[in-house]
Amino acid sequence: MKSLSSAQQLAMGVCVLAAGLVAGGCNTTKATVDTTVNFFSSTSPNELFTADGMVKKEQKINLFAGVAYENLRQEAASGSGQYVSALAALYDIPAAKQGEFGQVLQRKHADLFAANLQDDRNAHLKMVAALNRELTAAAIIP
């Protein structure tokens, strides 16, 4: 079986993501689509993939945060929900610490979601950076 080049993998990822957004029927807004396009246009393929062709963990988190930002903002206010659980899974948060993860999102909600994607196209990246600091400080991630 012939292996795909990084560009082909990137294109395939965009197609899968686009199909998911169209078929998913979720709260996909123009800001969400713009964030996804900007993410892929501003990231070189080598920054996206590991040596064995898998998408890097931090890139999965960044992409998910951009696509699901508004849903995450809503659920983080209560500290739980399917998007919060999906984000915890991307971070590899153990089941025993997922409640604590949700509490961090809830407690730091105003700081994490200070910006709106429509006003700041990097709001999701700022949220992830702030969340990484909070999770490290709370000893939820190393």
Image (cartoon, helix red, strand yellow):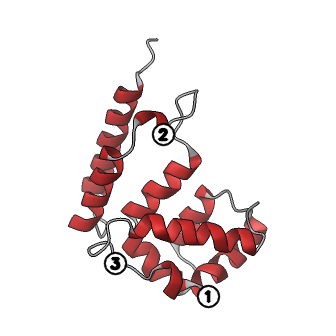
Q: Is residue 21 left or right of residue 86?
A: left
Residue bearing the label numbered 3: 116
Q: CA distance from mark 1 to mark 2?
A: 32 Å
Q: Amino acid at mark 1?
A: Arg
Q: Are marks 1 and 2 in contact (CB under 8 Å)?
A: no
Q: Are marks 1 and 3 in contact (CB under 8 Å)?
A: no
Residue 40 visible from this viewpoint: yes
Residue 29 visible from this viewpoint: no
Could you say where residue 133 lies in the image, as x and y percent from the top left? 65, 70
Could you say where residue 9 lies in the image, as x and y percent from the top left? 39, 31
Q: Residue at x 75, y 75 (%)?
A: 138
Q: CA distance from mark 1 to mark 3?
A: 18 Å
In the image, which disc is placed on residue 62? Answer: none
Residue bearing the label numbered 1: 107
Q: Are marks 2 and 3 in contact (CB under 8 Å)?
A: no
Q: Quadrant of the C terminus?
A: bottom right
Where disc 3 sits, the SS reads loop
Which of the marked residues, 2 or 3, is nearer the chain's N terminus? 2
Q: Amino acid at mark 2?
A: Glu
Where disc 2 sits, the SS reads helix
Q: Residue at x 32, y 66 (%)?
A: 121
Q: Residue at x 48, y 39 (%)?
A: 47
Q: Residue at x 52, y 56 (%)?
A: 61
In the image, which disc is placed on residue 47? Answer: 2
Q: Amino acid at mark 3?
A: Asn
Could you say where residue 124 lies in the image, as x and y percent from the top left? 43, 67
